Amino acid sequence: MGGAAAFAAAIQASGRGARVVIIERRVIGGTCVNIGCVPSKTLVRGAEIYFQTRNHPFAGLDTHAGPVDMSLVIGQKDELVARLRREKYEALIDEYGFDFVRGEARFVDATTVEAGGRLIRGKAFLVATGASPAIPDIPGLREVDFLTSTTALELRRVPESVAVIGAGYIALEMGQLFRHLGARVTLMQRSERLLKAYDPEISEAAARLLAEQGIEFLTGVRYLRVESGHAGKRVVLEVGGRQRVVEAEELLVATGRQPNTAALNLDRAGVRVGPRGEVIVDDHLRTSVPHIYAAGDVTLGPQFVYVAAHEGAVAADNALGVADRRVDLRVLPRVTFTTPAIASVGLTETEARAAGHAVRTSVLPLDAVPRALANRETTGVFKLIADADTGRLLGAHVVAENAGDVIYAATLAVKFGLTIQDLQETLSPYLTMAEGLKLAPLTFDVDVSRLSCCAG
């Protein structure tokens, strides 16, 4: 449990004068630095550059890209991971004076944990063991050699083709990564609509960008079986009432994550878990046992490293009794690191109406944003959700280059109750993608296509 939630809690508790013990069974640093955010995003960036070298929209620029040497790419990725693990985790153990124990933690009772041959007693405990790739129950799947989001980051050769089971953010990022490196990619999902939790305009823009980059995606599928084939793996599906076979050299399973709780003996401590093994917590991050807390992916909340770190600090304060903090994730920015990126904060239109708001919406196609025109990349959209009575911004959803950076401004607007008029009256730098957050509010009242540059 030596990841973001654990270290944030440990640093917070240490600053409050508490003695801290961290128990880790594997590599310190957790998912993000070792097998998640850091390695995947550096590979995504490298693949994006490679793709753009061979596929750019500018006349007169003759660019070439040779074969990919994945051994060198992976080696550079591993160097970055090792450096950040050392600087952001390992070095902090001595700096803060944590007691570090290597081993598998198991509860003996509600006040004692066994790990590394030691019995460790404490006044408060934090369960922050994270999660691992979940494997769906598809006939034949466990009999073939498939990839997960972890093992896919270790491939030393670009496969000719990749079939992806799932179409969530991990599937989209990893599928596009392999497509950018030159593989043929097919995404498959049970849902009828890509990114079904988003508004239709966002889903449609995401589907267009995948199609434009040559990714095939199948929706509304029913998985019949997985088997070995002459090309590698065969996924037998039913789509629209007809059987179809998808063959690929590699098969990537990206269907969510499973909490790491099986080995903890939580029942001995009296800690309740949910149907998927997730630790059940209240909004103070307390479990069913008042002095045992849980934070991060093990609770199956939003699986972002910044959420885990925030929750770790909240749990530490509450466990020590120095504060009574609640976790409020209503204004949570979310980013999918595709190219272009997909970012969202606040309510969707459907959620806003369900919450009882009278709703106004603004949908701004990306070709109305001057920066996108200058980039010659206009597949994307800005969508804003506002309360019709007060004008207050309720949600913002973006498919665009740098959407992950743009969404932070929208996060502040939603959090602090800014109105559409506030956004309209705020100056925005010209020829930035963030200008979309100025143009989209203007569309509530005017046709922005009939304005001059920087007008409004």
Image (cartoon, rainbow, N blue to C red):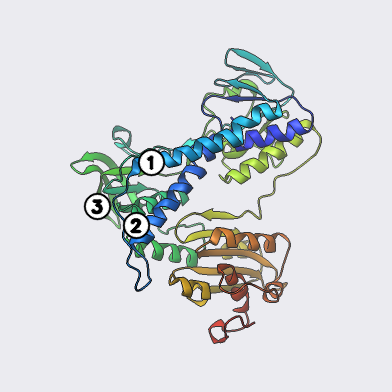
Local SS, label 3: strand
Q: CA distance from mark 3 to mark 2?
A: 13 Å
Q: Position of residue 31 (x, y in %)?
A: 52, 37
Q: CA distance from mark 1 to mark 3?
A: 25 Å
**For the residue carrying disc 2, how many other residues have a C-alpha within 10 Å: few (<14), some (14-19), or many (20+)?**
some
Q: Which amino acid type is shown beneath numbered disc 2? A: Phe
Instruction: Tell me the mark number nearer the camera, choosing from 3 and 2.
Output: 2
Residue at figure coordinates x 65%, y 28% from the top left: 93
Residue 372: % across, % down: 49, 71
- The residue sitting at 66% across, 50% down in the picture is 329
Q: Which residue is mark 2?
A: 217
In the image, what residue type sits under mark 3?
A: Arg
**What's the mark number on residue 152?**
1
Q: Secondary structure at mark 2?
A: strand
- Closer to viewer: mark 1 or mark 3: 1
Q: Which quarter shows the N terminus?
A: top right
Which residue lies most toward the left here? 230
Q: Label 3 belongs to which residue? A: 244
Task: Examine the rendered structure and indicate whether residue 201 appears above or below residue 189.
Answer: below
Query: Identity of the amino acid at label 1?
Result: Ala
Is 47 left, or right, of 286 in this rendering? left
Instruction: Tell me if 207 is positioned left or right of 365 in this view.
Output: left
Q: Residue at x 50, y 54 (%)?
A: 336
**Left or right: 272, with 146 as reference point:** right
